[in-house]
Structure formats: structure tokens, C-alpha cells
Amino acid sequence: MILEILTPEKKIYSGNVYGVQMPGISGSFEVLEKHAPMIAALQEGKLKILKDRLNGEASFFQIQSGFVEVLNEKVTVLIEGALPL
């Protein structure tokens, strides 16, 4: 699936991934390939990008609050800001 992480200033990340873990306002959750459509609010915390299933490659960002939309194998994360970890 395609993941895009956007802030008001710029695009932080764009690429193919197999999953992403995010800090929701009711607790952390994970979105994997073929996930049902959804919109959720995010709180400040750590976001984990699951890039490669075979070797366990992952990237991490410390994010500020925002929202995520999952639709048609595309995950769009709209946040106030992010720092790579």
C-alpha cells in the first residue's frame, strides 16, 4: 500500500509499505495492507513505518497530533509536524 505523511509545510514521507503503527487518541493501532476504509484522530507519539516484511525494515517518526485516512490501499497521515527518529 502507499503511505504519505504530510504536514502543513511539506511532505515528510511517501512510499510503498506493508503497514504503519500510529498513536491514536484512544491508543496505538496498526494499519496493514487491505485494511478497511477509516478516518482516525492521532495524538502526539511515535509512528512506525513497516517497510519490508522479509527483513523487518522499519522507520520511525515522532509526530504531533493530526488525522489519518485509509482508503483504497492508500494511507494518508495529516499531522502538525514530525521528526525522524
Image: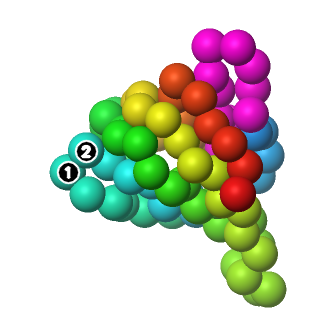
Q: Residue at x 58, y 49 (%)?
A: 62
Tell me residue 83's x, y (percent). Answer: 68, 42
Q: Which mark is residue 67?
A: none
Q: Position of residue 40 (x, y in %)?
A: 32, 37
Q: Which residue is drawn at 41% across and 33% down?
A: 65
- The magenta region covers 1-12
Are the residues flagged by discs 1 and 2 in contact, CB closer than 8 Å? yes
Residue closest to the eye, 50 or 61: 61
Element marked by disc 1: loop
Distance from the alpha carbon under mark 1 to that under mark 2: 4 Å
Residue closer to the observer: 27 or 55: 27
Residue displayed at 62% across by 22% down: 7
Question: Is 5 colored magenta in this rendering?
Answer: yes
Residue type at mark 1: give it: Ser
**Quadrant where the C terminus lies?**
bottom right
Q: Mark 1 points at which residue?
A: 26
Q: Find the residue positioned furthest to the top.
A: 8
Q: Mark 2 points at which residue?
A: 25
